[in-house]
Image (cartoon, grey):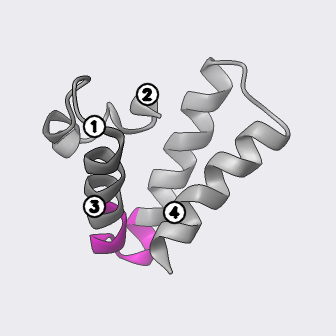
Amino acid sequence: MPASIVNYSWSKDFSPGMSLKKWQDGIKTKVQAMDDDEFDLFLAGVVMAASRAQMMGVTLTEKIEYFRALRS
């Protein structure tokens, strides 16, 4: 998922050496702080990054659902 956030200024807060738990907590905080329009743009970026990685179908749907679940 790092490719999903690389274009955001706050992506520097996430290092490759972070634990999975710390990464999940951090991304949840960032996603919950977004307003609806910003979140929609974020999801569009996720879809574009997935497209570049040739990710589609169930895998892409799971990724989008993951981010949506963080918002609830």
Q: Residue under label 1, please give it.
A: 19
Residues under numbered marks 1 and 4 in contact, where contact means CB atoms less than 8 Å apart: no
Within 10 angstroms of label 3, few (less than 14), some, or many (20 or more) residues?
some
Horizontal side of 22 relative to 24 (left or right) equals left
**Label 4: how many Cα within 10 Å (few below 14, some 14–19, many 20+):** few
* Helix, strand or loop under label 4: helix
Distance from label 3 to label 1 (Cα)?
Answer: 17 Å
Of discs 3 and 4, which sits in the foreground?
A: 3
Which residues make up the magenta segment?
30-38
Name the amino acid, label 4. Answer: Asp
Dominant secondary structure of the magenta stretch? helix
Q: Earlier in the sequence, mark 3 or mark 2?
A: 2
The numbered disc on residue 40 is 4
Residue 47 coordinates in the image, percent (x, y): 62, 40
Within 10 Å of disc 2 (Cα), the crowding (few <14, some 14-19, many 20+) is some
Q: Nearer the viewer, mark 3 or mark 1?
A: 1
What's the mark number on residue 3?
2
Alpha carbon distance from label 1 to label 2: 17 Å
Res 30 quadrant in image? bottom left
Position in image of residue 11 (x %, y %): 23, 38
Above-or-below relation of 4 to 21: above
Task: Say what secondary structure mark 1 lies in.
Answer: loop
From the image, state whether disc 1 or disc 4 is nearer to you.
1
In the image, what residue type sits under mark 2?
Answer: Ala
30 displayed left or right of 46:
left
Residue at which label 3 appears: 30
Q: Amino acid at mark 3?
A: Lys
- Please, is residue 50 above or below residue 20 in the view? above
Q: Earlier in the sequence, mark 1 or mark 4?
A: 1
